[in-house]
Image (cartoon, helix red, strand yellow):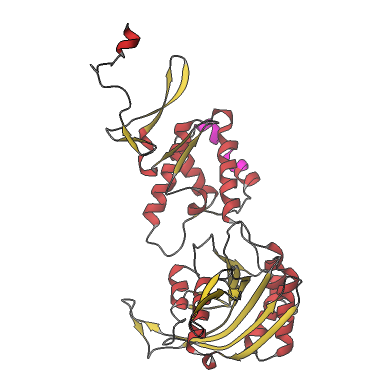
C-alpha cells in the first residue's frame, strides 16, 4: 500500500462514508486476563462513541510509510492450509460472527503481545465499495466493480487517568476527581488484506507500530505470520555501518556530508511520489560513487553491502538520513546545521590542528544574546582608575 491508498481507506472512517459492518473488542488486564468482550453492529453505536472509534482507526493508518506503516507479504507456508493467512481469511469471511474464531484471535494476540499494563483489542470488519476512476483520476461512484472486504485491528493501551480535583456542578463544589481507565491511541495494529493498486491483495498486510524501533517480532510472527521487514532504526544503523565499513579509517567529513547531501537531493526529487524511495545495492553504490567515495574503496562494495545489509536488502531513503537536521559531534561540542547549508562547515588545518570552520554572517546568538564573533577593530578598552593607580 502507498500513501494514496492508505488515505483512501482512512476517508471511510467518517459517518458519511462509513463501511464498517461490525466491531468487536476484548479488554485485557496486566495479567493477560480477558476482563470484557463485546460484539455489535458498528452503526448501533452512539454517535459520540463512534467518532472516538473513528479516531482510533485513523491513527492505525497514520505515520510514515516504511517507519510506522510497514507493508508485509505472506511467505508461501503462511498461505497453506492451517497457515496464519488462511486463519485471517476465515476470520474476515466470518464477518466477525464466529465466536470460536474470535476467541482464537484474541488468544493469539494476548499470547504474543508484550505489554505490562492493561490494553484493549479492537477488531472491525468493513466492506468498501471501490469507486472507479476516470482517466483524469476523478472518482466515479456509479462505476464500482469491486468490493474491498477487510479487517482492521487496533491494540490500544488502557491507562488510569491522573488524580486531581474537579468541579461538581450538582453540589456546586470542588471535589476529588474519580479516576477512570482511559483507552489511548493504538500502539500496534494492522489491516488485512492489503489495499494494493486500489484492489484487495490477500497476499499482503499493512502493519502499524507507534514506535518504529518496537515492532514486536513475536506478535507479527504469531498473529500475522508475514515476513517482517527491517525496522527503520535498524535500516539507519545498517547504513551507518555500511559507510564505516566502506570508507574504513579514511572516512572523512566531506565524503560523509556529500553522501547525506546526495540522499537528501534524491528524497526531494521523489517527494511527490506515493511510494517511499527504496534503495537497493545498485542504488546505494551509485550514491557512494557520486558522493566522491574513492574508487579503490568501492572495489569490494557489493560484498560489503551483502555482508552488512543482505544480498537483496532494500533501504528506504527517508529511514537512513535526516532531512531536517545535520549534527556534528565531538566529545565536548555538538554542532547542529541546517541540512540545506552543510556547505557552511569546512575542515581545515590551523596551527597544526584539525579544525571545523563555520562561516557566519552578522547574526550570532549566545544563550539568546546577540553577539559579535570577535571585538570590533579599534574598540577601546576601559580600565578602572583605581587599578591604573
The residue nearer to you, when weighing 385 against 219, is: 385
Q: Give the range drawn in magenta.
A: 294-304
- In this rendering, is residue 56 above or below 342? below
Q: Can residue 203 be seen in this view?
A: no
Residue 106 location (% of width, % of height):
71, 79
Occupied quadrant, residue 348: top left
Left or right, 381 with reference to 113? left
In the image, taking residue 313 as reference, residue 356 lies left or right, namely: left
Quarter of the image for residue 181 reads bottom right
State the predominant SS element of the stretch in magenta.
Answer: helix
Give 375 or 128, whichever is nearer the viewer. Answer: 375
Residue 268 image point, x, y percent: 38, 53
Residue sitting farthest toward the left: 378
Reply yes or no: does residue 347 show up in magenta: no
Q: Which residue is drawn at 39% across and 58% down?
A: 271
**Residue 279 as seen in the image, left or right of residue 380:** right
The vertical placement of 101 against 251, above or below, is below
Q: Is residue 379 above or below residue 346?
A: above
Q: Nearer the viewer, residue 104 or 312?
A: 104
Residue 229 seen in the figure:
yes
Q: Residue at x 36, y 35 (%)?
A: 343
Amino acid at each position: 500500500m502507498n500513501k494514496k491508498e492508505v488515505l483512501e481507506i482512512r476517508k471511510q472512517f467518517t459517518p458519511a462514508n462509513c463501511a464498517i459492518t461490525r466491531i468487536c473488542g476484548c479488554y485485557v488486564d496486566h495479567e493477560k486476563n480477558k476482563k470484557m468482550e463485546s460484539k455489535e453492529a458498528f452503526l448501533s453505536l452512539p454517535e459520540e462513541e463512534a467518532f472516538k472509534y473513528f479516531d482510533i482507526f485513523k491513527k492505525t493508518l497514520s505515520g510514515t510509510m516504511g517507519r510506522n506503516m510497514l507493508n508485509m507479504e505472506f511467505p508461501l507456508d503462511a498461505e497453506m492450509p492451517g497457515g496464519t493467512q488462511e486463519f485471517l481469511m476465515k476470520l474476515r469471511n466470518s464477518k466477525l460472527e464466529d465466536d470460536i474464531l474470535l476467541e482464537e484471535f484474541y488468544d493469539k494476540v494476548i499470547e504474543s503481545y508484550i505489554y505490562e499494563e492493561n490494553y484493549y483489542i479492537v477488531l472491525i470488519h468493513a466492506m468498501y465499495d471501490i469507486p472507479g476512476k476516470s482517466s483524469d483520476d476523478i472518482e466515479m461512484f456509479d462505476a464500482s466493480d469491486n468490493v474491498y472486504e477487510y479487517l482492521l485491528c487496533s491494540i490500544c493501551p488502557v491507562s488510569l487517568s491522573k488524580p486531581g480535583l474537579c468541579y461538581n456542578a450538582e453540589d456546586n463544589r470542588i471535589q476529588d476527581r474519580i479516576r477512570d481507565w482511559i483507552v489511548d491511541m493504538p500502539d500496534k495494529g494492522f489491516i488485512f488484506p492489503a489495499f494494493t493498486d486500489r484492489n484487495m491483495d490477500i497476499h499482503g498486510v499493512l502493519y502499524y507500530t507507534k514506535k518504529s524501533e518496537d515492532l514486536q517480532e513475536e506478535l507479527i510472527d504469531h498473529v500475522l505470520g508475514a515476513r517482517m521487514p527491517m525496522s527503520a532504526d535498524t535500516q539507519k544503523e545498517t547504513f551507518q555501518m555500511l559507510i564505516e565499513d566502506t570508507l574504513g579509517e579514511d572516512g572523512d567529513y566531506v565524503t560523509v556530508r556529500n553522501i547525506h547531501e546526495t540522499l537528501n537531493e534524491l528524497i526531494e526529487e521523489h517527494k511527490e511520489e506515493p511510494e517511499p524511495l527504496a534503495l537497493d545495492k545498485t542504488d546505494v553504490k551509485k550514491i557512494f560513487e557520486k558522493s566522491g567515495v574513492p574508487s579503490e574503496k568501492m572495489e569490494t562494495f557489493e560484498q560489503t553491502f551483502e555482508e552488512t545489509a543482505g544480498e537483496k536488502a532494500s533501504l528506504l531513503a527517508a529511514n537512513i538520513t535526516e532531512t531536517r537536521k545535520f549534527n556534528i559531534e565531538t566529545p565536548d561540542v555538538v554542532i547542529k546545521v541546517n541540512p540545506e547549508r552543510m556547505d557552511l562547515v569546512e575542515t581545515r588545518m590551523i596551527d597544526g590542528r584539525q579544525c571545523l570552520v563555520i562561516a557566519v554572517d552578522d547574526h550570532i546568538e549566545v544563550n539568546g544574546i546577540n553577539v559579535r564573533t570577535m571585538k570590533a577593530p579599534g574598540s577601546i578598552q576601559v580600565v578602572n582608575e583605581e587599578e591604573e593607580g
